[in-house]
Amino acid sequence: MNADAPADQPTPTTPTPRRERRERPEADRSPLARAWYKLVKAVATTSFAAFGGWRTSGFENMPAAGGVILVSNHLSYLDVFILGMGVRRPLNYVARSTLFVPVLGAFIRSVGGFPIQREGMGASGMKETLKRLRSGGVVTLFPEGTRSIDGELGELKPGIALLVSRAGVPVVPAGVAGTFSAWPRGRLLPRPHPIRVHYGPPILPSDLEGLDARAITALIRDRIAECVEVARRGLARDLGA
C-alpha cells in the first residue's frame, strides 16, 4: 500500500480480464443432427474412395467458425458430396424445390439441405440462407444455377452478388474436377472415376467494398475458375496425363 495515500482511499485493483467469446463451430445444428451428418459423410467418404478415389487440397482455407458461403462450379449430382467430404465443418445445401419429394426430401433436409425455386433463390430462399449464415453455418451454393452441360464453368446468376453483399461473411471458392466424367447430365447412373476438389482463399467482405454487383459476380467467377484449374491439374496428375 502506498504510504502517501490517504487512509480512506480504496486500494486500486487490477480488473479481471474478460474472456473473449469464441464462436463455436457447427453452431447451426443440434448435436444429433451433427452426428447424423458425420455418419452420412463417413459412408460417402468410404464409397468415393472405393469408387475411383478422391483428393482435396486447400481445405485449410475454410474458416474454422462463423458464417461462410461456399461457392463452386457444378458438374454433377456428386458435387454436393465431394464438397462436404473435403472439409471438417458440416455444410448446408441449397437444392431446387422439385427434389423435395417424400423420402428424398427428408434425407436432403436431414443433412442440411433446404429448397429454393428452380428459377431463382427468391425471398424465402434468401431468408433461410441468411438465417443459417447468421447461425454460424456454412452454406453451399452453385452460382451457375444448374449442372454444366459440357463440363465447363458457365456464367453465374446475378443474384449471387446480392446475397454475398447482404450476408457480409467470407466467401470460399471451390473447384471440382472429375465428377462430370463420373456422372454427367443425361447418364442414368455414375461410373468410377477419380475426383479432385480444391478450396481457394476466402473472399472477405472488405475485398468487396466499392464493387458493384457486376464486379462482385466477376470476382467470384474468377476465383472459382482458378480453383477449377488447380483441381484439373491435380486430376491430370492422378490420371498420369
Image: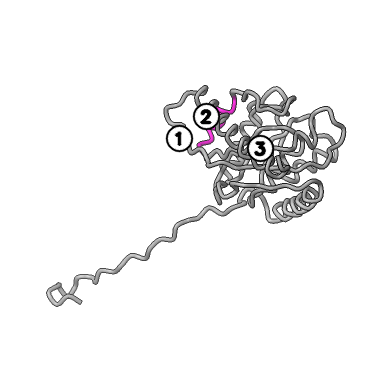
Q: How crowded is mark 3: few (under 14 residues within 10 Å), some or many (20 or more)?
A: many
Quarter of the figure with residue 70: top right
Which numbered tag is attached to residue 207? 1
Confirm or deny contact between disc 1 and disc 2 (CB under 8 A).
yes
- Secondary structure state at the residue bearing disc 3: helix
Q: Residue 219 carries which label?
A: 2
Q: Quadrant of residue 110?
A: top right
Estimate the spatial distance between the alpha carbons at disc 3 and disc 1, rounded to whole Å.
26 Å
Within the magenta stretch, is there residue 166? yes
**Few, some or many residues within 10 Å of mark 2 (<14, 14–19, 20+):** some
Mark 1 Cα within 10 Å, few/some/many (few <14, many 20+)? Answer: few
Residue range corresponding to the magenta coloring:
159-169
What is the number of the mark on residue 182? none
Mark earlier in primary sequence (3, 1): 1
Along the line of sight, the residue nearer the viewer: 119 or 157? 157
Quarter occupied by the N terminus: bottom left
> Label 3, on which residue?
232
| Rendered view: 95 above or below 238 | above
Q: Is residue 14 left or right of residue 110?
A: left
Distance from Cα at disc 1 to Cα at disc 2: 10 Å
Q: Which residue is drawn at 59% across and 23% down?
A: 158
Provide residue 112's location: percent of width, then percent of height: 70, 43
Q: For the residue marked with disc 3, what is the amino acid?
A: Arg
* Circle 3 or circle 1, nearest the eye: 3
- Residue drawn at (66%, 45%) of the image: 91
Q: Distance between the residues labelled 3 and 2?
A: 20 Å
- On the question of residue 146 being in view, the answer is yes
Instruction: Answer with left or right where residue 1 lies relative to residue 198.
Output: left
- Looking at the rendered structure, the kind of residue marked 1 is Asp
Whether residue 178 is in magenta: the answer is no
Q: Where is residue 14 in the image (x, y as percent from the top left)?
A: 30, 67
Task: Residue lying at the far front in this picture: please name it.
Answer: 241
